[in-house]
Amino acid sequence: MNSQVILITANSTWNIYNFRLPLIRQLQLNGHRIVVVARKDSFADRLQAMNIEYIPLEQLYPTKKGLLNNFRLLLEYRSIIRRVQPSIIISFTIKPNIFSGVIARWFHIPFLPTLTGLGSLFTGNIKPNQLLVILYKYALKKAHKVIFHNDDDLAEFVQLKLIPREQGRVIPGSGVDVQQFSATRAQNKDSFVFLCIARLIREKGVLDFIHASGRLLQANLKNVSFRLIGPYDPEDDRSIDEEILRKWEEEETCHYGGFVEDIKAEIQDATVFVLPSMREGMPRAVLESMSIGRPVITTDVPGCRQAIEHKKNGIIVPPGDVSALAEAMSDMMKMSFEERLKMGSYGQKLVFQKYSAEVIVKQYEDILNEMMP
C-alpha cells in the first residue's frame, strides 16, 4: 500500500481500544497515518498513551434521536473530515457509519463501513425503523464495500434493498488476540461454573440465563455455580429488572460481578460459557471463550449460530427457550471431562483458523489495497 491518511471512527474510544487495535496497529506498521474519531470516555487516555492520534466527538450520543442533536453531529463530522482530509474513512457502529458515510459521499472520499451487528431494531419481528433504513441507504450507496460480521445481516440488508449483494462482504468479527486469550486446560475439578458475559439488557438473553440457572438450582444439583458479568444501566429501558437480579443473587451459588474490564481470568475460571442472545454481529466473548478452550452454549440466531458447530464446540438452543437452555446446561454437566475438553479444543482450532486478529486484519488489508490509488 501507498502511505495514506486513514480516519477510523466508532461510537466510543472503548470500542476502538477493545476491538480495533489490531487493525490500527497493522495499518500503522504499513506506514499510514491513523486518526481516530470517537466519543471520549475513560479509554481515550489509553489511545493517546499509545501515540494514536485522537479527535473527540462532542456531539455523539448513541441513544439520542433528536433532530437538532443529529444535525450538530453531522456538522461536527463535516468539520473534522474537512480538517483531516483523509484518503479513506473506515467506520464502525450505527451513527458513525451513517454520519461519516454521508460526509464521505459529499466529499467523494473512499468509504469502508462495518456493521458489527444490526441491534434491537432488527431483532425478531420488529420492523426496522424506516428513517434508519433511508439514512443507511443514502450513507452506504457509494461505499467501496459494506462489511458485515455474518451472512444473515448481509442477507437482511440485501432484502431491504439497502445495498446490492455484490457490495457486501462478510468478515467474521473484529479478531481475537489468540496470544492474550491463549488456550488453558480446563480443570477437572468438582465445582462446575457457568459463565455469562453480556450487557444486562433483555436482547442479550440475560433473563433466560437467570431463569435457566434457577431451574437447575431447583434440581438440587451439587457443586454448581452461576456467574453473570456485564454492565448494568438503569437508564436504559432495555435493561432487565434490577429486582430480578437481586433475587437471583440471593441464591448463594449465583453471583453478579458487574462490569469487568479484563474478562480473561473469568473465562479461565469457567467450565462452560453461556450466551442466550437474541441477535449478534459476531459475539466477541463467545470467540474469546473458544480461544481459551471453553465449550459454549448459545442460541440459533444471527452471529451466534455462525460461531458454533452444534455438538462439536458447543450446543445451540432456540432463542428465548428457557427449558431448552436449562436442558443444554444440564447436558453439559452430564458430559465427561474428556468430552468437554474435546469441545474446547475444537473451538480453539476454529478461532485460530477463522477468527484470529491476524486472519481478520488480513481481510481488511486486502480490501484497503483495492481502495488505494
Image (cartoon, rainbow, N blue to C red):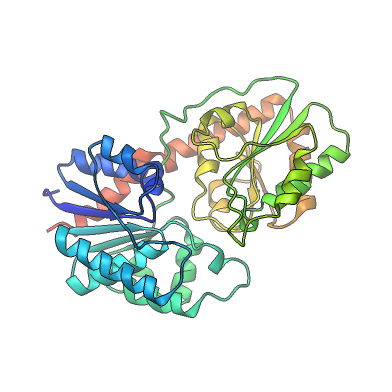
- Using residue 144 as the reference point, say whether residue 65 is left or right of it: right
Q: Is residue 157 visible?
A: yes
Q: Is residue 86 visible?
A: no
Q: Residue at x 30, y 40 (%)?
A: 47
| Rendering quarter of residue 367 | bottom left
Give coordinates of residue 240: x percent, y percent: 67, 55
Say above or below: 361 vs 144.
above
Say above or below: 123 vs 30.
below
Say above or below: 114 vs 344.
below
Give coordinates of residue 39: x percent, y percent: 36, 54
- Using residue 128 as the reference point, say whether residue 6 is left or right of it: left
Q: Residue at x 12, y 48 (%)?
A: 3
Q: Residue at x 39, y 47 (%)?
A: 41
Give coordinates of residue 177: x percent, y percent: 41, 35
Say above or below: 125 vs 284.
below
Give coordinates of residue 320: x percent, y percent: 71, 57
Nearest the camera: 150 or 97? 97
Residue at the extreme right of the image, as rendered: 219
Q: Residue at x 35, y 68 (%)?
A: 98
Q: Name the quarter where the C terminus is drawn.
A: bottom left
Please tell me how many numbered marks the rendered image carries. Answer: 0
